[in-house]
Image (cartoon, rainbow, N blue to C red):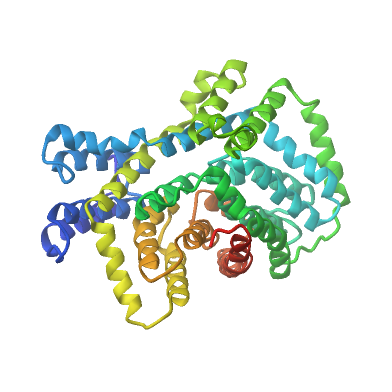
Amino acid sequence: MGFKPLPAAIAVAIALLIWFVIPVPEGVTPNAWHLLALFVGTIAAIIGKAMPIGALSMIAVALVAVTGVTNDKPSGAIADALSSFSNSLIWLIGVSIMISRGIIKTGLGARIGYLFIAVWGKKTIGIAYSLALSELILAPVTPSNTARGGGIIHPIMRAIAGSYDSDPEKGTQGRIGRYLALTNYHANPITSAMFITATAPNPLVVKLIADVTGAQIQLSWGTWALAMLLPGLVALAVMPLIVYMLYPPEIKSTPNAAQFARERLQQLGPITRGEMIMLGVFAILLVLWAGIPAMLLGAGWAVDATTTAFIGLALCLITGVLTWDDVIKEKSAWDTIVWFGALVMMATFLNKLGLITWFAKSIETGIGSLGLGWMQASALLMLAYLYAHYAFASTTAHITAMFAAFYGAGLALGAPAFPFALMMAAASNIMMTLTHYATGTSPVIFGSGYATLGEWWKTGAVMSVVLIVIWLVVGTTWWRVLGYW
């Protein structure tokens, strides 16, 4: 059987209930309501893990096309169902994931991590900062936060912990491993918030902000990076200290760690041709994504962010750092393109058919009845949106289901569009801190056994509050300095 019966039955039942049983509300068209039924059913199936998200997305495309909820003509319906596969943001993330394979394949990611530890690894807290800095360096070109935090940084962290005989199976995780595992994880949501290309759902946030504001706000890679730079750096500076206070490691001085890292670097040998090429590609991507040619030479030299990603992939293929087989086998990239395309399509047409506007208006009415000012009302909306992630096992599903309506409601209640967009974008990443199923990186690191469920949830709850405060205080002040509001 290709699906899990119980989650699938629940998802189907929810979709049928909305479609056939619940009356279409006043102000909503039948087609919009029926698309909502398909959408909610799809999200429920994703949350319940009835099938892989890519498979569910293919089914969603088929259902949108065959039901004709967006277009009465069959040819128009399938064109609508496939429309988002031409969205450049989808290809930006898919191609960037393909490029990030080169960082793993060449060993550049591991080398960066060991270089930092060789310099700052004489204290346990120095190792924690080295892991966080490695995350930060890799984040702009690794849209799979799971690959970055779980596939590159986590093995380095485990190797260091193992060198100090800190092993969950021996009951010695408290020596150093628990602290390093928690800092390894909590660096991941922070760096994810700092760049559009640091995690796959961020471009979805960009798309939804543009849709809600009628394209008046279109966050570029450079604008996002600059806006998140200062609060992100403050968060990375504070996070290891907070975790240290919550769960101090038994071993505080680690002179052997720096030596261990140097030994690993010796095993890796001199920097290879492939690593040098990846560094060059890395530099080109950052220069073009940051819009530096346009700044120096004028608007005629501007390069689109997705075009930049294709340039990077082309360079990797031409130089042989990646082969076409590597690209074909990068399942996460193709999977992302499929599910991203389907969910963006459904969210786009929910907006076009007026459902998001209606839902935002309903939220606005409910919050407005409390008699709060725009600042308190928008804060309440942001917190409700963020902490709803306890009910989600997918940041993508959560963002697709809730972001547009909550952002739209905040605007209607008087929140300034640009800073509220940035705050909601930050919240879309901060929510990854909460649980051991919050994002793909969570089960990888939690599954290694260094932290108990209680320790994980406690740290997540504390860090969510710390990060919210940092973005509200440092972030909003920084955005004022930048003239964003």
| Residue at the limit of the structure toward the bottom, as seen here | 371
Q: Nearer the viewer, residue 299 or 254?
A: 299
Q: Position of residue 138 (x, y in %)?
A: 65, 41
Q: Quadrant of residue 290?
A: top right
Q: Nearer the viewer, residue 244 or 73?
A: 73
Residue at (23, 56) in percent of width and height: 354
Is 217 situated left or right of 429 in this image? left
The image shows residue 382, relative to residue 148, as above or below, that is below
The image shows residue 150, relative to residue 416, as above or below, that is above
Q: Position of residue 393 (x, y in %)?
A: 43, 55
| Residue at the limit of the structure toward the front, as seen here | 298
Residue at (35, 33) in percent of width and height: 86
Query: How many discs mark residues in the rendered view?
Result: 0
Residue at (70, 47) in percent of width and height: 157
Is 475 situated left or right of 30 in this image? right
Q: Nearer the viewer, residue 471 or 157?
A: 471
Q: Nearer the viewer, residue 43 or 193?
A: 193
Is 200 situated left or right of 161 in this image? left
Q: Position of residue 356 (x, y in %)?
A: 28, 58
Residue 28 seen in the figure: yes
Residue 444 seen in the figure: no
Q: Position of residue 360 (x, y in %)?
A: 31, 65
Q: Quadrant of residue 405?
A: bottom left
Q: Quadrant of the N terminus?
A: top left
